[in-house]
Each structure stands twice: as structure tokens, then as C-alpha cells.
Amino acid sequence: MDRRQRVTRLVEHARSPRHRGVIPDADVAMPGGSPECGGSVVVYLKADGDGGIAGLSFTGEGDTISQGATDLAIEKVLREGLSLEEVLALDYDGFIEEIGRDVVGSRTRNATLGLSTIKNAVRRYLRERGGRTSARSVS
């Protein structure tokens, strides 16, 4: 994917997010924000009770990078069927590379706002449930 395609993809996810909305029976509603980027999100996490994720969505306000990258992060988690533990192991630099370092430029906080909030939602879920992820584990 060239730079123009990466920019188009990010803008499309910001303008027409696939994972925007509230999960009414979410286990966790985790707010996140960054004074540096002026963006804010709330991530909604519904766990499946077996170490996996049954639902993940967000609401928020901010620039194209923060909102588009949040939608892309959720899409990655859901598309790859990541477990709670695998979400915690996601690499910020690797995620920036997937979006396009040339697209994000110096605005890495904007691009990682959603991913860091997703990780915080998972941490809260695990903390509130005594750190148990049940039968699923990272291979």
C-alpha cells in the first residue's frame, strides 16, 4: 500500500468508522484522552468469559488520525480474533507501521490513543475479575 492509499484508508475509517457505537451491556467503558492531540475516546469492551473478546467499539471526538486509528485498532483486534492477553501484547510501533509512519508523522500519540485505551480497558477488565482470562491463552 502506498502513502496515498494509507491516507485514504485512515480518512475513510475516521469519516465512516465501522466500530463506532456504545455496547449497552459492556463489561468495561474505558475513557481515554490525550491533551497533546485534543482527542478523546471511550472504548467499550465485552469479554466472552473465556479470555476472548465478544464485542469492542468506541465513541469519541478528535482529529482524523485519532479517530481513524482507533477504528483501525478495533478492526485489527476483531479481525484477528485476539484474546485479551494478545491485545496487551500488541506493539505500538508495529501498529504505527501498519497505519503508516509516513502518514502519522510526529503525531504518534494521536495514532496510539485508541490502542492504549483498548489496552487500558482490557487491564481494567482483568483487574476487576482478579486477572483471570480463563481457558484461552497466548501461544
Image: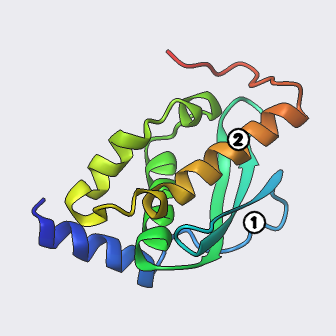
**Do the residues bearing badges 1 and 2 touch, measured as CB atoms within 8 Å?**
no
Q: Earlier in the sequence, mark 1 or mark 2?
A: 1
Residue that lies at the very extreme toward the top in this rendered image: 139
Q: Residue at x 54, y 67 (%)?
A: 36
Quarter of the rendering containing residue 2: bottom left
Q: Where does the image place residue 6, in percent across and percent down from the top left?
A: 22, 66
Q: Nearer the viewer, residue 111 or 72?
A: 111
Residue at the spot x=13%, y=73% of the render? 4
Q: From the viewer's perspective, is the residue at label 1 or at label 2 nearer? A: 2
Q: Position of residue 91 (x, y in %)?
A: 43, 36
Give the vertical position of 135 relative to 10 (above or below).
above
- Mark 2 residue type: Val
Label 1 crowding class (10 Å Cα cut-off): few <14, some 14-19, many 20+? some
Secondary structure of the residue carrying tag 2 is: helix
Image coordinates of residue 73 in percent, x first then y, are 47, 54
- What residue is rendered at 56% in x and 37% in y? 87
In the image, residue 98 above or below residue 125 = below
Q: Secondary structure at mark 1?
A: loop
Q: Which residue is mark 2?
A: 122
**Mark 1 and mark 2: span between their CA atoms?**
15 Å
Is 107 placed above or below 139 here? below
The amino acid sitting under disc 1 is Ile
Q: How many marks?
A: 2
Q: Residues within 10 Å of mark 2 (few under 14, many from 20)?
A: many
**Res 24 → quadrant:** bottom right
45 or 31, which lies in front? 31
Q: Which quarter of the figure is the N terminus placed in?
A: bottom left
Residue occupied by mark 1: 23
**Image point 58% across, 49% down: which residue?**
116
**Residue 5 as seen in the image, left or right of residue 49:** left
